[in-house]
Image (cartoon, grey):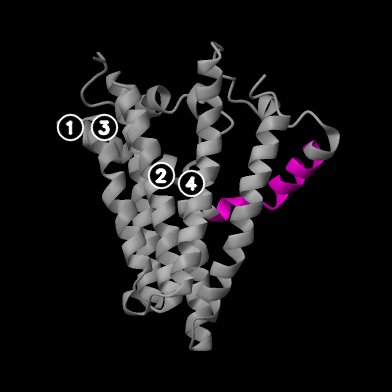
Amino acid sequence: MSTHLSEPSIADLRRVTQPESVLGRANAEHWAGRLYMRRLSPYVTRLLLRTRISANGVTWLMYPSGLLAALSLTLPGLAGALGAVAFAQLQLLADCCDGEVARWRGTSSPAGIFLDRLAHHVTDASLAIALGVRASGGWSSIDGWTTLGCLVAVMGLLVKAETLLVPLSRSAAGRAPAPDTHAVAVPRGGPLRRLRRAAGFAPVFRALVTMETTLLALAAALVDSAAGRLIGTRGLMIALVPVAAVTLVGHLVGILASSRLR
């Protein structure tokens, strides 16, 4: 257990729980975390440290917030889309705080990492399905739009499986984990390297991630409201199918062409 003070200052919390060695990794932090949530999270973490809740207990809070985001998205009108965005923010806050509590108390564990990653998988897949339900017109009108949502959810999960199979494959081959750096992730070939750089300027693949999905769904709901019909939501649902397919194939090619499996 950590011997840090029971009532730390915000500066101490930032120093211990937000080190550059963690936040500076290539895939460590969502843009919303860097932009604003990491500014707020130490204040919430300090409140959590006054309680008996464990770091894993904080991680478990990601599940209801993520599922409530998906459930809210199935509700009609702007209110449902706004609720999805709000619950996604709560999940991001819990995602920041669980690691901070663990680092301050010195209780980081494989179980915590597992629960954290599973929460993201469950939420992202649930949101894709929920968007399909919304495009169908609600739970009483489930049809082919919901099927498209399920298809996007499956492809999104396969993208995540590709990522997680990299360290598993290295471990099975008796090799250490690959460094989480841009240099390792970049394809070795020139054309693929340029394609990856171009994708960084227009990261459409992020449409499959919780924060971006809820924000896009809110934008689509605004279009729906203005048009008086589900043109925005259905257009977004149609667009996500090729985005998910291209991301799935592109991610696989990118992994095989990089140094991650070398």
Residue 226: x percent and y percent? 52, 85
Numbered tag placed on residue 56 in the rendering: 3
Q: Main secondary structure of the magenta part?
A: helix
Left or right: where 40 falls relative to 165: left
Extent of the magenta region: 193-207
Q: CA distance from mark 4 to mark 1?
A: 36 Å
Kind of residue indicated by mark 4 = Leu
Q: Residue at x 48, y 52 (%)?
A: 154
| Viewer-proximal residue among 50 and 238 | 238
Left or right: where 102 falls relative to 203: left
Q: CA distance from mark 4 to mark 2?
A: 10 Å
Kind of residue indicated by mark 1 = Arg
* Contact check, label 2 and label 1, Cβ < 8 Å: no
Residue 30: x percent and y percent? 51, 42
Compared to 219, does 189 lie above or below? Answer: above
Q: CA distance from mark 3 to mark 2?
A: 14 Å
Q: CA distance from mark 2 to mark 1?
A: 27 Å
Disc 2 crowd, CA 10 A, few/some/many (<14, 14-19, 20+):
many
Numbered tag placed on residue 120 in the rendering: 2
Reading the image, the residue beneath label 4 is 157
Numbered tag placed on residue 50 in the rendering: 1
Q: Residue at x 43, y 75 (%)?
A: 143
| Viewer-proximal residue among 261 and 1 | 261
* First of labels 4, 2 by sequence position: 2
Q: Residue at x 67, y 25 (%)?
A: 184
